[in-house]
Amino acid sequence: MNKKTIPLFLIALAFSCLSCQEKESIYVSPPLGNVTFKEGFWSRYTSQNAKVTVPYCVERCAESGCLHNFQLAAGQINGDYLSDNTWLDSDMYKALEAAFYSLMKYPDERLLQKTDSIVDTIISAQEKDGYLYTARTTHASHPRVVKFMGKERWTNMGHFSHELYNMGHMIEAAVAHYELTVNNRFLNVAIKAADLIVATFGEGKLTYPPGHQEIELALIKLYRLTNNASYLDMTYYFLEARGKYAERPPYTDEFFKEYHQDHLPVSEQREAVGHAVRAVYMYAAMADIVTLTNNEKYKLALDSIWNDVMEKKIYITSGIGNQQLGEAFGLPYHLDNLKAYTETCAAIGLVYWAERMFAFDQDSKYYDVIERATYNGILSGISQDGRHFYYKNPLESKGNKKRTEWNSCACCPPNLARYIASMGSRVYGVKDDRLYVNMYAENQADMEVNGTNVHLLQETGYPWEGDVRLTINPDKKQTFSVCLRIPGWCLNQPLPGTLYRVYEQDKTSERPNVWVNGEEFDYQIEKGYIRINRKWSKGDVVRLELFMRPQRIVSHPAVLQNENCAALTYGPFVYCAEEMDNVTDWDKLELSLSEPFSCYSMTTDFSIIPKMPVLSQNDDLKLIPYFLWANRDTCKMKVWIPVRKE
Ligand code: FUB
Ligand code: ZN
């Protein structure tokens, strides 16, 4: 890899007092390069992502018009802007971001060269003052694009120009590029664009907020890398501008106020409304502000919105955005399974939000959502061949829903690629002298805790099995706490809140077992974690035994769509029935509350999940993990099964 000298401003950053203070008290995830999945579930997913999905996304972006538009803006070719939307640039940026994460673990000379040449084109596509938006630079003529982008720069953000959204994704890609290469040629593009944004928006300048939130998250990433506080201030300004109308043109349609979470000042918002992806990206940025600046008002707002989602607006798969109109959060408890919109990007954005909530409050409930979303509402978005994608992830199908190769609005595929490629960053975290083990997965990692490098070896069959063996190898003997997450599903809590509960007869009373160097460890669970504080030495071993078993789930009675129905979970997985596995008349399919479930493996043709664990009740009902649905062929599917009257 072509690494260059570390730029001066980063060296300065290392000596900055502010950043040192932050590092001591702020929760940090390990750099992506420090976590390696060698075997198991995530090794298969990340390597298929590296070999198939990431190059595929880059290729599709090249074919779909993205690359063409950048080349056009760069003056490298002639022609017209391709696409009927204004956010095509963002597909390429997300695909690049995915590639840069993936290349950290899976070197691929071809992909590196390809992405290098795309970065060159992007550099040339940027206008002199930092503006980067190919639709305008190329004078796009498609009527929909002309309408969306508005007559002049920044004038139609509330009606789909996506200028700041695209530039946000560009900044995130550039930060990832820098992390991979320590070369700032792409980062300079990001800084130039960010400086233009800072010069354009704010008091006495343009005062309105972005349409589609995203730039907020990007500017915070850029702030964390460069320590330039104007980027943090800009994010705060953009958040604060929402719901305030004194100095800006009104929306042509009131609908857009809630759609853009622009109906109230953000600190006064208490419920999740509007376009789901926009909403969760915004809540994620607000959570960053809480972590970085201790903003109490934002914390209050976020706690309330979080509870609103958990109590009323989330599917058991952690899919969110139940309403088709506006791809939005809909009515409380209205969780239609067939019409569930549950966009893949919304589930991904929910994780971005949850991980930032966790950063300021280390409570395992946030990881319960991250885990449920990851293994269900997110991974269902990608096929086992790594080249077909769902945009919507309903919990019931009449058999007509196939994953597609690509869409004209292809936001989800590259979002999935970057999500999978960055999975390593979600496994561990450190705050002060506490090392958090948040997700169980076969891996090796290096973390710095209490000034000491700690090498970790995690051996486990998770997510399918609940046994974990963690070998802890500090460079020198050191005292710190290892905090083991006890997933909510072990404590009869399928998701935080009261929307879903485990049927009485399936509740487990078995407490997880923990051993330290072979000796049973007596514990209490605090905020979903078991804390083991001791002086650790090389070769210390912690063992954890979580009891994984099928659990029938019932939803809150206010969810009329699930009346007299149950869903089945097994550890972090939600299960579903597909018509092809069930000989019973589909409309008469029932689940018994008294019969136990047995588990067997079904061999598949898939490289990622070669054996699919099937749960069955005699010959009457067979269920497979929800995320694998519609992989063999399309057929009818449902998650919520009517309960047999017994
Ligand atoms: O507008 C950009 C993206 O396209 C949104 O995040 C998705 O919901 C889709 O509408
Ligand atoms: Zn999407």
Image (cartoon, rainbow, N blue to C red):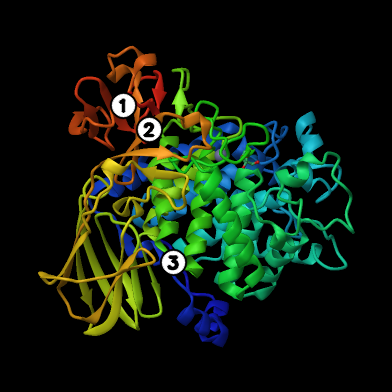
Q: Is residue 359 left or right of residue 489?
A: right
Read off the residue under disc 3.
3
For mark 2, give the secondary structure: strand
Residue 102 in the image: above or below residue 286: above
* Earlier-in-chain disc, 1 versus 2: 2
Cα–Cα gap, marks 1 and 2: 7 Å
* Amino acid type of the residue that numbered disc 3 sits on in the rendered structure: Lys
Q: How crowded is the residue under tag 2: few (<14 C-alpha within 10 Å), some, or many (20+)?
A: many
Residue 591 numbered mark, or none: 1
Cα–Cα gap, marks 3 and 1: 58 Å
For mark 1, give the secondary structure: loop
Q: Residue at x 83, y 42 (%)?
A: 150
Q: Residue at x 37, y 32 (%)?
A: 566
Give the percent coordinates (x, y) of residue 544: 20, 61
Give the percent coordinates (x, y) of residue 522: 20, 71
Q: Residue at x 71, y 43 (%)?
A: 259
CB of mark 2 near ligand 2 (< 8 Å): no
Read off the residue under disc 2.
566
Cα–Cα gap, marks 3 and 2: 54 Å
